Amino acid sequence: MDTSWVDKFCLDMPFTTKDYQPVWDAQRYFVGGKMFMMRGKYKDKRPIITLKLKPEYGYLLREQYDDIIPGYYSNKEHWNSIFEDGNIPIELLKDMLIESYNLIYHSLPKRTFDNTK
């Protein structure tokens, strides 16, 4: 699966920032200071994207796709890892990225983006 578009896709979402975590060799994507996605490597060095989903949705996707697993080095109930070299439809990955972003964005206090203070 071609994932060259993922960086731009995430950074185009409002208020998204990115950093690099050298200890994990991973790019992390944040909204309001809270991570919604990470790109790194699995223990076998395969590239992965880890993102947050509602537990029931994550479990359903893991049952349907071998290339979606419980979040690597993350809370396995809420976080899911997707092998970038796997066989996941691009539209599904886009939907998961949007879902992860929205879960974090909507959990933030409204004052997080208040520019009047």
Image: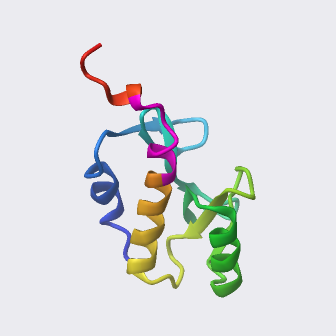
Q: Position of residue 113 (x, y in %)?
A: 33, 29
Highlighted range, magenta: 103-110
Q: Quadrant of residue 46?
A: bottom right
Task: Determine the image quadrant of residue 51.
Answer: bottom right
Residue 44 x, y percent position in the rendering: 68, 64
Quadrant occupied by the C terminus: top left
Disc tally is: 0
Please say whether residue 1 is visible from this viewpoint: no
Image coordinates for residue 21, horizontal then vertical, percent:
52, 36
Instruction: Tell me what residue is drawn at x 63 percent, y 71 percent.
Output: 57
**Quadrant in which the N terminus is drawn:** bottom left
As drawn, 64 above or below 85: below
Horizontal side, residue 80 vs residue 35: left or right? right
In front here: 49 or 60? 60
Q: Position of residue 77 (x, y in %)?
A: 74, 58
Residue at the extreme front of the image, as rendered? 110
Relative depth, front residue between 112 and 74: 112
Residue furthest out toward the right: 76
Taking depth in this image into account, of 87 and 37 the one nearest to the observer is 37
The residue at the far top in this view is 117
- The residue located at (53%, 36%) in the rendering is 22
Chosen colour scheme: rainbow
Residue at the spot 47% in from the left edge and 31% down from the top edge: 109
Q: Quadrant of residue 59?
A: bottom right
Does residue 74 show up magenta in the picture? no
Which residue is at 44% across, 53% downward?
102
Residue 31 shows up from this direction: yes
The answer to whether residue 91 is above or below residue 116 is below
